[in-house]
Amino acid sequence: MSAFAYPPHKYSPDSYGLWDRSLVLDDLGHYKVQWTASSTDIQFRLTVRTRGYIGFGLSSKSRMDGADIVVGWVHSGKAYLQDRHGLGNLEPAVDRFQDWTIVSGYENDTHTVLHVSRPLNTCDPHNDHAITNDTSRVLWAYHPDDPVDPDSPRPRLHYHGDFRRGTRSVFLLDRDPGVEYGHSGDAYGQNSAYPSESSKDKKPEESEIHTWTLNSPGVEVKADMATVYWCKLFRKPLLVQKNHIIKFEPIFSAGNERHVHHILVSECTSDDPAVVASLEQLADSSGGQCYSQDMSPLLRACSHVVVAWAVGSKGLTLPPETGYPLSPNGPTIFLMQVHYDNPDSRHFQDHSGIRVHYTHKLRNFDAGVLSVGLDPNWKHLIPPGQASVLSSGHCVSECTSKAIPPAGRLRITHLLGREVRLRHLRQGVELDPIAQDLNYDYSYLEYRLMKQPRTVLPGDHLISECKYSSVERSAITLGGINTRDEMCLSYLYYWPRSSLSLCHSKPSLNTVLQSLGIEELSQ
């Protein structure tokens, strides 16, 4: 029997209690998924604005072919469910083994709601998708009508059309790093990296939380600009005492979300009076392109990253034990760098940026941000036409001068990235990776919160490792800042804060020349 029918089940929206994660999958808000995972299985609640069938799939790729798909509907008061798998763009085939289970389901005048579950690993590598810590692609679809012959073992599905389907990349086993304080009834800190027993008592009152908004000043991106890096300097808010940054999230100009690839906010400090004067002067301007003649020399004074956001992320709420320090006597000028990606040659203006939340109710530890990996420059070479190319950037033992337990991490590569890993070595012995994603998605760079604290000791060696596929490239890809270039960087939030904020390596010129078969340079 391929279809499972269950009697009607009436329940309130909250009858299943709290869900760990929730996501609206479509732009119209018609398809919402909530889920909770245990060590052995995962449960989903699908709430869709339809009285027809619902399709939901999991895959390592953003397409139906080979995807693990479940289809459900409610007909004559009974909930039905079928485990299927994708066959190209054809109707998904019914699986021999039905590994998805329907817990309950119902429909009302406008919506269909299904509560379904399945094991994390069904041991069916041909038709099912194993759910791991790697990025999963969630496929969704729905139709206003039930399948043809909805009571039969193999009902036929109506084609959902082009506008009732889509895909999203998701970390299914992670907690939400950007959760609001008290969101969905959570105790404060529940979705932070390491919630403590007393975290609920540490929740700042709303009157104790202030916001600092950093916006782009109407940056004009013209149709002939494929990549733009815009830098704008800001003065920090007026402070009378030390504060902690406890949270941040991106803000977008409507319609420009797809063009903003990443945003960095950094402290600016210098012992050179001329550099300080230039920073003060530029803080009153609308900024400029980061690597222009005016801006480029100042970037070295603004290398200590405070906020790192990238496409796909909702932001970050720091653990209740720690906050990033913002002090009256600290740096007064901050640099916001926004990377715009414009592959469709659109002409637009942008006011996107970052909203920072800070409080004078201090946490126990000051947090820091550490960038580990390959310095993004032309010496990073990726040959064309290769199915797999491995690049590594090192933070060597001489640089890890303080113990730094990472709290969350964000990995950045560009278009060719397929796998990323942050390796950890101690006294010549390799430990478990600090971070790893064997199914990386360039367009989904959400923060990953560690399930257990990790400590980096003095003398430890960190390696940011990226695997690329250049099969579709006919020329060498160079390292660099443009989207068609490549990079391999990991950003880690950690505590307690140290002076180390950037730990990169790069190939020597001799190594690059040897790899290109060049034995001698002449002038």
Image (cartoon, helix red, strand yellow):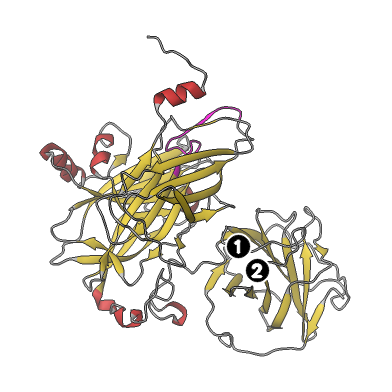
Residue 221 horizontal/vertical position (percent): 41, 41
Indicate which disc, 2 or 1, sits on the residue closer to the N terminus.
2
Task: Identify the residue at image location x=36%, y=52%.
Answer: 351
Mark 2 to mark 1: distance in Å?
7 Å
Give the residue furthest to the left. Answer: 273
Q: Marks 2 and 1: CB-CB under 8 Å?
A: yes
Task: Identify the residue at image location x=69%, y=54%.
Answer: 63
Task: Identify the residue at image location x=88%, y=74%.
Answer: 153
Disc 2 crowd, CA 10 A, few/some/many (<14, 14-19, 20+): some
- Which stretch did the figure color magenta? 474-488
Q: Quadrant of residue 155?
A: bottom right
Disc 1 marks which residue? 132
Q: Quadrant of residue 80?
A: bottom right
Label drawn at residue 120: 2
Q: Is residue 240 found left or right of 64 in the rendered image? A: left
Residue flagged by tag 1: what amino acid is it?
A: Thr
Rendered view: 464 above or below 179? above
Image quadrant holding the C terminus, namely: top left
Task: Identify the residue at image location x=36%, y=69%.
Answer: 319
Residue 282 horizontal/vertical position (percent): 21, 43
Label drawn at residue 192: none
Between 507 and 283, the residue placed more toward the observer is: 507
**Residue 487 part of the magenta segment:** yes
Residue flagged by tag 2: what amino acid is it?
A: Leu
**Residue 436 part of the magenta segment:** no
Rendered view: 501 above or below 520? below
Between 367 and 426, the residue placed more toward the observer is: 426
